[in-house]
Image: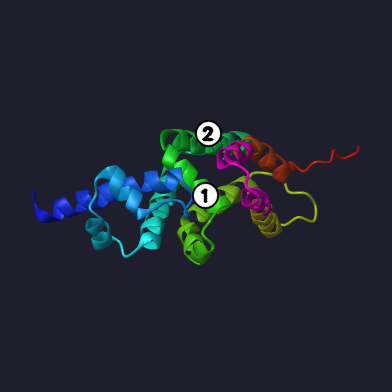
Amino acid sequence: MKQEERSKRTYQRILTAAIAEFGGKSYESASINNICSVNHIPKGLIYYNFENKDQLYLRCVQACFDELTAYLQSASYPPDDTAGSLRLLLARRQTFFTDHPSYKRLFFQTLFQPPLHLANELRTLRRAFDGFHAARYQAVLDHIELRDGISAQAAKEYFFIFQEMFNGYYQMQAVGGTDLSLLIENHESKLPALIDLMLYGVAKEKD
């Protein structure tokens, strides 16, 4: 085996072990020492490939967002079926997380319990993911009739405001010590209803 191939395999082995470590614990609790001991990886190999814990963590998060975004993008969303398109998006997201449980916890940790000193880097890593959802929301807006006085631009701004408020609500609970697994379950169960409310509101218009 060529040296280049061995190096790639070593890098991937470290990354896979780190994803399992960071995906199973909080950023603070995860450790390079544990990655090494559990997976029988010499510490020198990790520091040869990654400068420090922060760089290794960010590379794990990047892999999570890149693979999730690519998986969501690979679907064909029905342009004329708003509800069906959104259901498909949520279903594919759930399928991805079911198939990649470590990515699931890592993803939600970045939403609810992000290491504050890496906030800017995490926002950068989310750009493709957020851009995909913005494009999907725009596609929905292109096929629905907006209420009088609501422009497409305003609707997009509301979408991001709702998203930040929704995630911020769970961030506060995470800070308060609520178990991450419970937060994930609660978040995902309420997400379809939130999207419906975001699109159609809560008040029934009078005739």
Q: CA distance from mark 1 to mark 2?
A: 21 Å
* Rendered residue at 39%/46% (across/down): 21
Q: Residues within 10 Å of mark 2 (few under 14, many from 20)?
A: few
* Percent coordinates x, y for residue 118 in the rendering: 49, 64
Amino acid beneath label 2: Ala
Start-end of magenta stretch: 165-187
* Percent coordinates x, y for residue 35 in the rendering: 33, 49
* Percent coordinates x, y for residue 204 in the rendering: 85, 38
Q: Nearer the viewer, residue 81 or 75?
A: 75
Label 2's element? helix
Against 85, is 3 above or below? below
Mark in the foreground, 1 or 2: 1
Does the magenta portion include 182? yes
* Rendered residue at 21%/51% (across/down): 10
Figure quadrant of residue 182? top right
Dominant SS in magenta? helix
Amino acid beneath label 1: Gln
* Rendered residue at 30%/61% (across/down): 50
Against 76, is 2 above or below? below
Against 151, is 188 above or below? above
Label 1's element? helix
- Give me the disc on residue 91: 2
**Residue lying farthest right?**
207
- Give me the disc on residue 109: 1
102 sits to left or right of 137: left
Q: Residues within 10 Å of mark 1 (few under 14, many from 20)?
A: many
